[in-house]
Image (tube, rainbow, N blue to C red):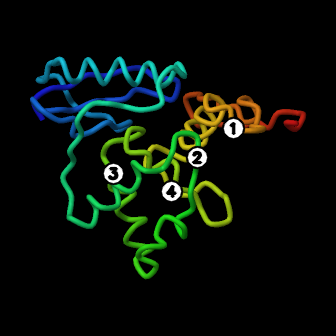
Amino acid sequence: MDYASTIESPIGKLTILADDEFVCSITFAEKNIDHLTENVLTKKVSQQLNDYFKGNLKHFDFPIKQKGTEFQQEVWQNLLAIAYGETTSYAKFSAHHPLAIRAIAAANGKNDIAIVVPCHRVIGSNGKLVGYAGGLWRKQWLLQHEREVAQKGQTELKFKHIYIEDDIRKSRYQKLFKSC
């Protein structure tokens, strides 16, 4: 990678890595980018991610490219077809390759372009949140944010689960009342 930008988001710091033509990574993982500078592309991505978190952007329009096998590329391309504010189960997502559900889940987990390639929109067949490299609390936040912005029927109150970070651990508190 030749260029990098970072943004502070409601769910933590995101690092954007790119070359001259493509975004190669958007990650919550800590990266040493001291030797890298921003370019027009990483600045554009930063702005679009900020707009996404403000609820003003549902579709990203910058070029992406990540390294992976042909199979992984197919999985990541299929992730892009999951509509904003929607979810699908791993079983439905793998219907075109029913015997490859584990390989599809593994490819999903190898996605290096968080949020933009929306691996967070794939959930367990029972409706539970499963597997997200950024942490399930982030996955829950992203899905709730997208549902609220898309105004999809009744949604959970955003503050049903509040995460408080202290020096030792993250604690989760349930709100005293249920959502409508």
Mark identifier at residue 152:
1
Front of the two marks 4 and 3: 3
**Residue 111: image tag:** 3
- 73 or 134: nearer the eye? 73
Circle 2: residue type? Glu
Quote the CA–CA distance across marks 1 and 4. 23 Å
Q: Position of residue 175 (x, y in %)?
A: 82, 33
| Tags 4 and 2 touching, CB below 8 Å | no
Q: Look at the numbered disc 3 and give the secondary structure of its residue.
A: loop
Labelled pair 2, 1 in contact (Cβ < 8 Å): yes
35 in relation to 110, above or below: above
Front tag of 3 and 2:
2
The image quadrant where one finds the N terminus is top left
C-alpha span from label 3 to label 2: 19 Å
**Residue 170, quarter of picture:** top right
Q: Residue 90 in the image: state x and y as whole percent.
A: 52, 65
**Which one is earlier in the sequence, the residue at label 1 or at label 4?**
4
Q: Nearer the viewer, residue 25 or 176?
A: 25
Q: Can you identify the residue that label 4 sits on? A: 131
Residue mark closest to the camera, 4 vs 2:
2
> Closer to the N terminus: mark 3 or mark 2?
2
Q: Which mark is residue 86?
A: 2
Toward the viewer: 122 or 82?
A: 82
Q: Residue at x 13, y 23 (%)?
A: 36
Residue contact between numbered discs 4 and 3, judged by CB atoms under 8 Å: no
Q: CA distance from mark 2 to mark 1?
A: 9 Å
Q: SS at mark 4?
A: loop
Q: Is residue 92 left or right of residue 77?
A: right
